[in-house]
Image (tube, helix red, strand yellow):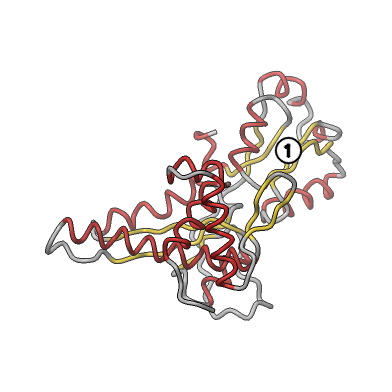
Amino acid sequence: MGALNFKHLRYFWVVAKAGGIARASEQLHLTPQTISGQITLFEDVLGYKLFERVGRRLELSDAGRTVLSYADEIFTLGEELEGVLRSPGGGRPLQFRVGVADSVPKVVASRLLEPAMRASQALHIVCREGKLSGLLADLAVHRLDIVIADSPMPSNLNVRGFNHLLGESGLTFFATADLARKYRSRFPKSLDGAPLLLPGEDAAVRAGLMQWFEKLQVRPQIVGEFDDGALLNSFGQAGMGIFAAATVIAQEI
């Protein structure tokens, strides 16, 4: 492999962050053809394909995800360096790298991290969102300092780490006024056949919900499944179905 070209690395980084070459070309003020050609050269030097085309979309390959994680660190450090040079004597802030499982409500994650932000003005928090398995892999190689998740670390995973319970919450069911009027009577038995929006399979709350329904012998009609909690809430607020969320964030829904 030849010497790493940091200009090519930056082009790749912007494309990965922007979600495509067209958007990246607007940010970089370059033609899509130029960016595409530079990334092809970068892939040739590395010896790996960094993107895979899925339909009309570009998705990161396994090698691309690895390169992106390093690029994030490289360019974050570059931004820190610029900040330090603009403020002589300010020193480099302590970096706190946090992984947040995508099944954790964003409001909960921000509440947990807020005390750390208030504790020291020199603290620089870097948050990464993703699947728990990927975040734990980054934790194992010290790319993350902690991982916030809605379930304990699997016991069969070969990662040295510790679980700490940070809090607990019950569940509350939410629905638009029309759906609430229709299914409020005889709740929770009334949920049998009711339209239900579920979190994705990685969410710990999903398994608990399904066990609860089984115990009650209630079988809702599952009309949607969402990895992204904010998207689930949006569909629920649009009246697409009933959904459950942590009681602790009820006021934010």
Provide the secondary structure element on which disc 1 rests: strand
* Residue sitting at x 67%, y 54%: 203
Q: Is residue 114 left or right of residue 199?
A: left
- Left or right: residue 176 versus residue 110 is right
Q: Say which quadrant the C terminus sits in.
A: top right
Question: Which sits in the foreground, 8 or 152?
Answer: 8
- Amino acid carrying label 1: it is Leu
Q: Could you say where residue 224 lies in the image, as x and y percent from the top left? A: 76, 38
Residue count near mark 1 (Cα–Cα under 10 Å), binned few <14, some 14–19, many ≥20: many
Which residue is drawn at the image coordinates 58% and 46% (left, top)? 20
The residue lying furthest to the left in this view is: 89
The location of residue 124, given as percent across then percent down, is: 32, 59
Quarter of the view holding residue 27: top left
Who is closer to the viewer here, 104 or 63? 63
Q: Is residue 194 above or below residue 90?
A: above
The image position of residue 48, as x and y in percent, is: 63, 70
Count numbered badges in the picture: 1
The relative height of residue 252 versus residue 216 in the rendered view (above or below) is above
Q: In this image, 109 relative to 169: left or right?
A: left
Position of residue 157 measured from the top left corner of the image (x, y, whole percent): 65, 77
- The residue at which mark 1 appears reads as 197
Q: Residue at x 47, y 75 (%)?
A: 142
Location of the N terminus by quadrant is bottom right
